[in-house]
Image (cartoon, helix red, strand yellow):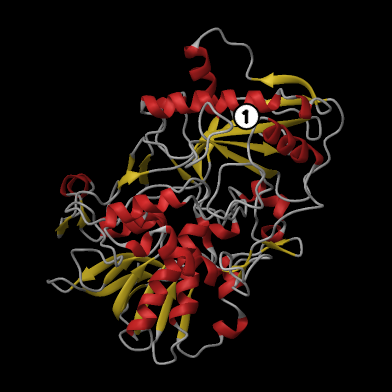
Amino acid sequence: MTKATIECERNADVIIVGGGSAGALLAARLSEQPARRVLLIEAGEEANDPDIWNPAAWPVLQGRSYDWDYRTEPQAGTADRVHHWARGRLIGGSSCLHAMGYMRGHPSDFQAWVDATGDRRWGWDGLLPAFQAIEDHPLGGNGLYGKGGPMPVHLPSDEVSPVARAFIEAGASLGLPRLQGHNSGQMIGVTPNSLNIRDGRRVTVADAWLTPAVRSRANLTVLTGTRVRRLALDGGNRVRSLEVVGPQGTLEQVFADQVVLCAGALESPALLMRSGIGPHGVLAAAGVGCLVDLPEIGRNLQDHLLGAGNLYAARKPVAPSRLQHSESMAYMRAGDFTATGQPEIVVGCGIAPIVSECFQAPAAGTAYSLLFGITHPTSRGSLRISGPELADRLIIDPAYLQTGQDRDLFRQALAAAREIGHHDELAEWRERELLPVSFKDKAGIDDFIAQAVITHHHPCGTCRMGRDANAPVDADLRLKALDNLFVVDASVMPSLTAGPIHAAVLAIAETFAKGMTAEG
């Protein structure tokens, strides 16, 4: 690796590390002030694969060159399987890869954040202005939803699959309320999924915020194909510079007054650890000297799982989804379709034979799947580095299904899926149930779930914000040990929201941007 030092042309007032969902939004928002020089550093390149913008193509994007394609440790709770974690390595990040679902979460999800931080900015009411600023919602301007924001929120109607329509009817007949999207604050119920789609095309965060007009700002610089190797401290409580590896393998230094980590729930804590900031024992095992001992960096790792799936052979051909396959998610309390409050489990309708790698999928068009999962897993995993260099692999252990509560709720989620799947409203589509095969006891159910679950692609929590002494990040999203380093991505979430976390990540970034803009 060739070393060079650049202390002038790449200096900035703010350096943002990571051009994904939070980073792209922040680059646009913070550069609105012409006097503030913003440098955005992204490991990947610009998005150019046309499949990215085809909503139905999202499952086949995984494993392509712009997917980090992380691998977990073998999971005892999932039949010792290694799970592939798709994360976007390109401008726009995972917003270029995910299934486009837009769900704010339930108000109780955010009350947990208020309880953790002691700060009402992170509650439902506190975050509402941020959600509204993000959104261009068809019902926007009514005091609840946003209108004219950068990110479209599409409410599907005519294009919803007849299988999904029958699924919704089955859920409603069992007592689930009919909703108009998942974002009103009431999540329990049935509805087509709200999606970040406009005119039949995916809208990435880069499409929404890093528009040509924003890219042309003289005070915004975007570096692609560039990774941050480590943060260099000044010997006190500030980041002095960043060591970055450019596209040609050159090692350079960049300088800024403030540094914002937006590299995600895996790479943000990994960068801190490579820089000597993290649990002393983990760093020592990886051959990194500990400069700041923060035991909770990399801990509290959480992720949603979905069982894939409760599979049914179809009585007649299932037409391909005109959306993105997973067309409706029904949230509910466990064991009672009529109960209200914060969701505990979810059942989704897949307009395709969606199964884990443990099972053979039938031919497309011959079957459909009901996916099932829990909304607030209590299992907590960890992330750690294996060495000091960028090439050293991350050791990812989500500790899936390690608590009795998680396993019990998963059984109830499967039971709810099967009750919906066997209901009369789906009779015209259901020929027979293919998965699960018959089982005799709870152990058999658990064995099937262990083989069926797949990631829902929502890793978070590894740099959690909180007011307790062990929380690495404070309510202002500042790393407590350093004055000029902030973390703004899914890693700061103390706990999962009930559904997909992307909307919440955008709201976190918007709230942080508003605070920085107010400070000038």
Q: Position of residue 382 (x, y in %)?
A: 32, 42
Q: Position of residue 367 (x, y in %)?
A: 76, 29
Q: Position of residue 497 (x, y in %)?
A: 45, 48
Residue sitting at the far right: 316
Q: Is residue 250 left or right of residue 242?
A: right
Residue sitting at the far top: 440
Q: Is residue 463 visible?
A: no
Quadrant for the N terminus, please. bottom left
Q: Based on the displayed image, in which of its 4 quarters is residue 417 positioned?
A: top right
Write the residue at 41% across / 37% down: 377
Quadrant for the C terminus, please. bottom left
Residue 194 versus residue 198 in the image, above or below: above
Residue 345 versus residue 384 in the image, above or below: above
Q: Is residue 411 left or right of residue 466?
A: right
Of residues 184 and 294, which is closer to you in this image? 184
Residue type pointed to by label 1 = Gly
Write the residue at 25% across / 64% down: 479
- Other residues around mark 1 within 10 Å, as few (<14) / some (14–19) / many (≥20): many
Write the residue at 26% across / 60% down: 473
Q: Is residue 324 visible?
A: yes
Residue holding disc 1: 309
Q: Position of residue 27 (x, y in %)?
A: 46, 76
Q: Based on the displayed image, in which of its 4 quarters is residue 422 positioned?
A: top right
Residue 24 versus residue 200 in the image, above or below: below
Q: Secondary structure at mark 1?
A: strand
Q: Report the number of discs.
A: 1
Q: Is residue 328 left or right of residue 426?
A: left
